[in-house]
Image (tube, rainbow, N blue to C red):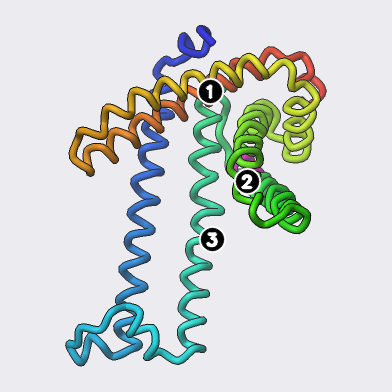
Amino acid sequence: MVRSFNELDRRALMVLVAQLVFVITYFLFLVGLSRLFEARIESLSGAAAQQSFLSLQDMLATIPLQQLLGLLFSYAVAVVVITIFYAPFFEWLTWRIIYSRRMSARSYLNYVWMSLLWFLIWGAVATLLYLFIREGWMPIVLFMVLMPLAVYLSLILNAVYARTDRVFMSVRGAFALGIGKLGRFIIPIIAAMLVLLVLMVISWTFAFLPPRLEAFMLTVVLLLYSVWLRFYASVVVQPLNELKKYK
């Protein structure tokens, strides 16, 4: 754990900047898309031309169902496409910086494919759980078990991929190391949870700040933690001899 803090050199600053750029630009993209959606709704409903004060719900009711579904589908596709190609780019960039690896278009496109595969795997797991677990227990299972497990294995997945640039080897390595060698990760997991707990306690003091400043400070704390957590994962995974078979 101490070594992970020692690893926080100029690479950590580069990673933090990359994460900030992603958060800001992705937020602006969603806001801009929302504005375009509302403007298009007004145009289709004729509300803008009539200078009326209809609510968004009322304007939606005036649009033919086929046009509305087409509009929703087009904007959903835009969000999905941007998410698939844009969000993975910054995660891929982050791990290339951490391991000081050479960047290439092929490595990035392979990472996009791996991210999509990883999403489908967890989507299938969530679907199976939904089918076999009582509905009342589903939120608890998702947030208390599945999501932490997905984050834990995703960190290992990214650490392995940054060293190998191999999609299926990385997926296999994530499960082989994360599940098969769970005992070696118990102490790092507890350490990461303790650091998060300390940051949560510190974050309680932000409640006395103005709402916008509070949201900003919470975002900064989460970004700092996410940067450190990635470096910590790289330090924990790197010395494992089992990684040799994934190279």
Query: In the image, which disc is placed on residue 62?
Result: none
Task: Tell me whether the residue at label 1 lies in contact with that at label 3, contact meaning CB atoms closer than 8 angstroms.
Answer: no
What is the C-alpha distance between the residues marked 3 and 2? 22 Å
- The residue carrying mark 1 is 193
Could you tell me which quadrant the C terminus lies in? Answer: top right
Position of 186 with respect to 86 (left or right) is: right
What residue range appears in magenta?
A: 106-111
Establish if 89 lies above or below 48: above
Q: Is label 1 in a helix, a strand or a loop?
A: helix
Residue drawn at (26%, 34%) of the image: 207
Amino acid type, mark 2:
Leu
According to the picture, the residue beneath numbered tag 3 turns out to be: 80
Membership of 196 in magenta stretch: no
Q: Are marks 3 and 2 in contact (CB under 8 Å)?
A: no
The residue identified by callout 2 is 142
Tell me the mark number nearer the camera, choosing from 3 and 2.
Answer: 2
Q: Nearer the viewer, mark 1 or mark 3?
A: 1
Q: Earlier in the sequence, mark 2 or mark 1?
A: 2
- Res. 130 image quadrant: bottom right
Estimate the x, y position of residue 224 in percent, counting from the top left. 39, 27
